[in-house]
Image (cartoon, grey):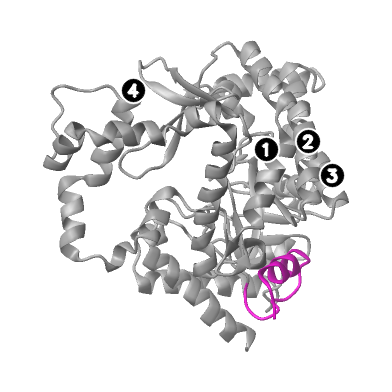
C-alpha cells in the first residue's frame, strides 16, 4: 500500500505520481478547523442565521479579550443579546482563567506540554480525514517561548513571545495578527532575540513533536497516516520579530548598511545565531525520524523579491543553505515557503530574469511552496525548473473562500493542466494544494471540492 510519506518523498525526488497526485497544506487557520470539526455545513440554516444575527463568535472572543485586558471595554459599544448575556455570566471568568494557556505554561510546564500534544493531535484529525498527504504543525511552539501578557502602546495587554512580539486574535475570524514589537530599541531587540535562540530548549521541543507524531488516531500512529512536518520561521522572518511589522523601513536600512559593510554587524550576527539554533533543531528532528522540515520565510511579494537578489543571496540565502545542508546530512528534506513572485521582470537576459529563483535553488531546498497564483505562472516555472525542484500547490486560496464548487473544480483543473503542460506532459515533482494555506475564510465544502478534483482529474490526466 502506498503511504503519504511515499507520495511526498517521491514527488520531492521529482518522480511521477505513484498512484495519485500528492496533496498538502501548510496549515489550517483556526476558523476553518472549527467549522470542519463541528460540521458547520450540516447545522440547520436557522442556527447559522442566529449565529450571524447574534455575532456569537465575535462577541465570545471579544468577551475573553476584555477579561484578559486585550481589549478595552467601551461603555458606548453596542452588543447583541448574546453579547450582553455572556458578559454577565458568572461561569465565563472561570473558563477564561482556565483558558489562559500562557499562565499554565509558566506555572505548570508539564500540563502545558500535555495540552500542546493534545491540541496538536486533535488538529491532525482534519488533514487525515480529508485525505492530505503532508501537513505542518505551526501550533507547536518552542517550550518556554511565551513571555506572558504585556501592555502595548495602545494600552491593551497582549500575549508576547520571548522574541519580543505582541500577538492579537481577530474576533471576527480568529486570525492571529502581529501587533508590533515589545522593544522599540533595535539593539536591545536584537539582543533579546539572540538570548532566546541561544537558550531555546530544542531537545524538549523535539520530545513534544515525537509524542504528537507517535500518538494514535483511529488505531494508527499519526505519522503513519500522513507525513507530518514542523513549520518554523526562517532568517528573513526576523524582520517581524526584531523591527516589527510597522518598521520595515528600519529593516531595509539595517540590511543595506550591514551588507555594504561586508555582511558584518549585530543583525547579521543574529541571523547566524538563529541558523545555529535551526541546525540544532533539524538534527534533533532527524533523530526522532522526521522526514521533512518546512521553513517559513516570506521574502517576496506579488511584484517580486523584497530584497535585491544579490543582497538576498549574500545576507539571507547563505543561512538557509547552512541548515538545508544540515538537514540533508540527517536524511531530511527541506521545503521552503515564501509567497510572492519569483521572476524578475523587464530584464534582458535569462540569467537576470531568473536570478532570484536561482538564488533560492542554490540553497539546496527540495521543494518550493506555494507558487502564489496571481504572482506566478506555474506552467512557466514548471517548464524552466521542473527538473530542478518540486513545485507545490498553486491553487488560489481566495477561490476557497469566495468561490463555488464549480469554480473551484474548474480552477483546480486549470492548474493541473498547466503543471502537466509545463512538465512536458508529466506531473512529476508536483504536490497539489492551495497557494498559501487554509485561511480564515476558507469553506470546508470548497476545500473538499478541491481535493476531490485533484484526485479525480489527476487520475484522468495520468490515465489511471
Q: Residues within 10 Å of mark 2 (few under 14, many from 20)?
A: many
- Frontmost of labels 3 and 1 is 3
Q: Name the one closer to the observer, 260 or 403.
A: 403
Asked whether the residues under the numbered discs 1 and 2 touch, taking CB atoms below 8 Å apart as contact, a structural biologist would say yes
Rounded to the nearest angstrom, the CA distance separating label 3 from label 1 is 14 Å
Q: Determine the secondary structure under disc 1.
A: loop
Range of the magenta residues? 1-21
Which quadrant holds residue 217?
A: bottom right
Asked whether the residues under the numbered discs 3 and 1 touch, taking CB atoms below 8 Å apart as contact, a structural biologist would say no
> Which one is earlier in the sequence, the residue at label 1 or at label 2?
1
- Frontmost of labels 1 and 4 is 4
Residue 362 showing in the rendered view: yes
On the image, the x and y values in percent for residue 49 come to 17, 57
Q: Residues within 10 Å of mark 4 (few under 14, many from 20)?
A: some
Q: Is residue 58 left or right of residue 189?
A: left
Q: Name the one closer to the observer, 379 or 447.
A: 447
Rounded to the nearest angstrom, the CA distance separating label 2 from label 3 is 11 Å
From the image, tell me which residue sits under label 4. 69
Q: What residue sits 69% from the left and 66% below the top?
A: 8
From the image, tell me which residue sits under label 2. 319
Amino acid at each position: 500500500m502506498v503511504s503519504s510519506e511515499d507520495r511526498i518523498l517521491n514527488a520531492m525526488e521529482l518522480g511521477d505520481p505513484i498512484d495519485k497526485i500528492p496533496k498538502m497544506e501548510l496549515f489550517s487557520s483556526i476558523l476553518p478547523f472549527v467549522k470542519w470539526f463541528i460540521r458547520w455545513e450540516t447545522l440547520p440554516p436557522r442556527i447559522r442565521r442566529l449565529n450571524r444575527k447574534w455575532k456569537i463568535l465575535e462577541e465570545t472572543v471579544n468577551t475573553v479579550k476584555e477579561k484578559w485586558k486585550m481589549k478595552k471595554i467601551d461603555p458606548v459599544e453596542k452588543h447583541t443579546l448574546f453579547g450582553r448575556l455572556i458578559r454577565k455570566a458568572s461561569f465565563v471568568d472561570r473558563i477564561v482563567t482556565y483558558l489562559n494557556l500562557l499562565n499554565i505554561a509558566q506555572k505548570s510546564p508539564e500540563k502545558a506540554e500535555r495540552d500542546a500534544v493534545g491540541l496538536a493531535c486533535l488538529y491532525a484529525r482534519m488533514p487525515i480525514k480529508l485525505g492530505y498527504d503532508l501537513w505542518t504543525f505551526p501550533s507547536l511552539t518552542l517550550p518556554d517561548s511565551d513571555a506572558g501578557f504585556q501592555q502595548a502602546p495602545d494600552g491593551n495587554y497582549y500575549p508576547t513571545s520571548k522574541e519580543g512580539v505582541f500577538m492579537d486574535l481577530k474576533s471576527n475570524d480568529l486570525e492571529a495578527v502581529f501587533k508590533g514589537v515589545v522593544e522599540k530599541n533595535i539593539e536591545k531587540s536584537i539582543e533579546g532575540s539572540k538570548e532566546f535562540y541561544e537558550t531555546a530548549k530544542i531537545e524538549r521541543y523535539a520530545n513534544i513533536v515525537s509524542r504528537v507524531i507517535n500518538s494514535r488516531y483511529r488505531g494508527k500512529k499519526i505519522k503513519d497516516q500522513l507525513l507530518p512536518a514542523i513549520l518554523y520561521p526562517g532568517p528573513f522572518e526576523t524582520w517581524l520579530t526584531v523591527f516589527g511589522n510597522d518598521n520595515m523601513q528600519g529593516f531595509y536600512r539595517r540590511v543595506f548598511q550591514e551588507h555594504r559593510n561586508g555582511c558584518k554587524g549585530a543583525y547579521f550576527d543574529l541571523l547566524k545565531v538563529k541558523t545555529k539554533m535551526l541546525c540544532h533543531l533539524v538534527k534533533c528532528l532527524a533523530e526522532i525520524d522526521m522526514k521533512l522540515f518546512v521553513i517559513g520565510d516570506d521574502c517576496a511579494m506579488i511584484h517580486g523579491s523584497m530584497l535585491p537578489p544579490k543582497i538576498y543571496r549574500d545576507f539571507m540565502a547563505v543561512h538557509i543553505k547552512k541548515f538545508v545542508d544540515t538537514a540533508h546530512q540527517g536524511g531530511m528534506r527541506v521545503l521552503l515557503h515564501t509567497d510572492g513572485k519569483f521572476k524578475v521582470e523587464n530584464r534582458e537576459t535569462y540569467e537576470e530574469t531568473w536570478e532570484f529563483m536561482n538564488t533560492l535553488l542554490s540553497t539546496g531546498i527540495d521543494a518550493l511552496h506555494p507558487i502564489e497564483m496571481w504572482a506566478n505562472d506555474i506552467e512557466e516555472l514548471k517548464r524552466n525548473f521542473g527538473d530542478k525542484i518540486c513545485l507545490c500547490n498553486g491553487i488560489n486560496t481566495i477561490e476557497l473562500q469566495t468561490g463555488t464548487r464549480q469554480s473551484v473544480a474548474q480552477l483546480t483543473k486549470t492548474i493541473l493542466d498547466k503543471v502537466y503542460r509545463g512538465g512536458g506532459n508529466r506531473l512529476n515533482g508536483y504536490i497539489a494544494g492551495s497557494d498559501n494555506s487554509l485561511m480564515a475564510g476558507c469553506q470546508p465544502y470548497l476545500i473538499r471540492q478541491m481535493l476531490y478534483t485533484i484526485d479525480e482529474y489527476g487520475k484522468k490526466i495520468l490515465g489511471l
